[in-house]
Image (cartoon, helix red, strand yellow):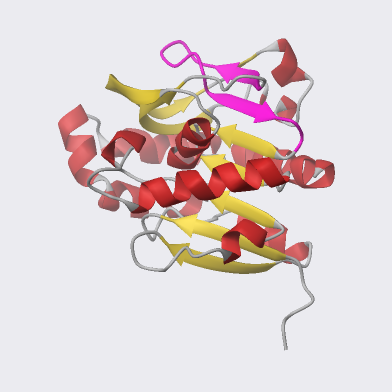
Amino acid sequence: MKSSAPQATAIRHVLFEDLGLIGPILAGRGFEVTYLDAGVDELGTSPADAELLVVLGGPIGVGDADRYPFLGQEIDLISRRAEAGLPTLGVCLGAQLMAAALGAGVGPTGRTEIGFSELTLTQDGRESVLAPLEGVPVFHWHGDEFEIPAGADRLASTGGFPNQAFSLGSQNLALQFHIEADLRFIERWLIGHSGELATAGIDPQALRDGAARHGCQLADAAREVIESWLDGI
C-alpha cells in the first residue's frame, strides 16, 4: 500500500554530498525521503510528482551533459516541476541545473570559490528566507556560475560570484553555496575532493579550521532558512 506520508526525493551525485542538515528537518515534518543516485538509479517520472525535490551538489557541471546524459534528464525534470508549480530546492550543481532548466546560462568561470565567506544579501535576499544568513560565513565549493533566470529574484552574491542564490516564486529556491552540509563530517568532503583541493592549492586544514570556527553558527542559521522555506511552500 502506498504511503500516505508526503514524499521528498533527493537526487544525489556523490554519496557524501547528501541532504545533511536537511534530512532531520524533513523527517521531523513527516516526509518520507527517497534518494536517487544520478547515473545509477532511473529518474523516471516519480520525482516529477513528489511533494518536494532536492537536487544536490557534485563535481560535474551543466556543460558536461554530453558526457553525463543524466544531467539532461535532471534539467527536464526540474523544468516539468517548475511548470507544475511543485517545490524544488537546488544546491550548488542542483542550483545550476535549476538555472538551466529555467532558461538561464550556466558555465565555468576558470576559478574556484572554496571555503567560508559571508554573503552579501540583496534587498530581495534580506526580505527572503535567506535573512538568517546575514553576517554568517557560509560554506562554498564551486567553480561554475549561473545567470539569474527571467522573472526570478537574485538573493545573494559574493565578491567573485555575483549570483549566489535566486528564487522563483515561493516554490523554487536555488543556492550556489552548501547550506545543507553537516560540517561535523567535513572530512568526507576533504577526502572525496582531494584532487580538486590539490589542484587549487588549498590546504585541507584551512577548511577544517573554518568548519570548527563557523559550523555551529552556520548550522543554526541553515536550519532556520530551510524551516522558513518549507513553511512557505
Q: Is residue 187 visible?
A: no
Residue at 48% x, 19% y: name it.
147
Q: State the residue in front, 60 or 41.
A: 41
Can you give x and y, in whole percent of width and height, for residue 96 in the image? 46, 34
Q: Left or right: where does residue 224 sit relative to residue 59?
A: right
Q: Left or right: where does residue 74 sit relative to residue 167?
A: left
In the rendered image, the vertical position of residue 59 relative to residue 159, given as above or below: below
Asked whether residue 177 is drawn in magenta, I would say no
> Which residue, as the protein is rendered here, is positioned at the far right?
231
Q: Is residue 16 visible?
A: yes
The stretch of residues the image draws in magenta is 152-170
Asked whether residue 161 is drawn in magenta, I would say yes
Answer with the quarter of the image where residue 48 lies: bottom right
Q: State the residue in front, 16 or 91.
A: 91
Can you give x and y, in whole percent of width and height, for residue 202 in the image? 24, 30
> Which residue, as the protein is rendered here, is positioned at the far bottom?
1
Residue at 61% x, 26% y: name it.
166
In the rendered image, the vertical position of residue 72 relative to residue 2, given as above or below: above
Image quarter where the N terminus lies is bottom right
Image quarter where the C terminus lies is top right
Residue at 49% x, 13% y: name it.
162
Can you give x and y, in whole percent of width and height, for residue 209 in the image? 40, 36
Residue at 73% x, 43% y: name it.
85
In the rendered image, the vertical position of residue 88 relative to residue 142, given as above or below: below
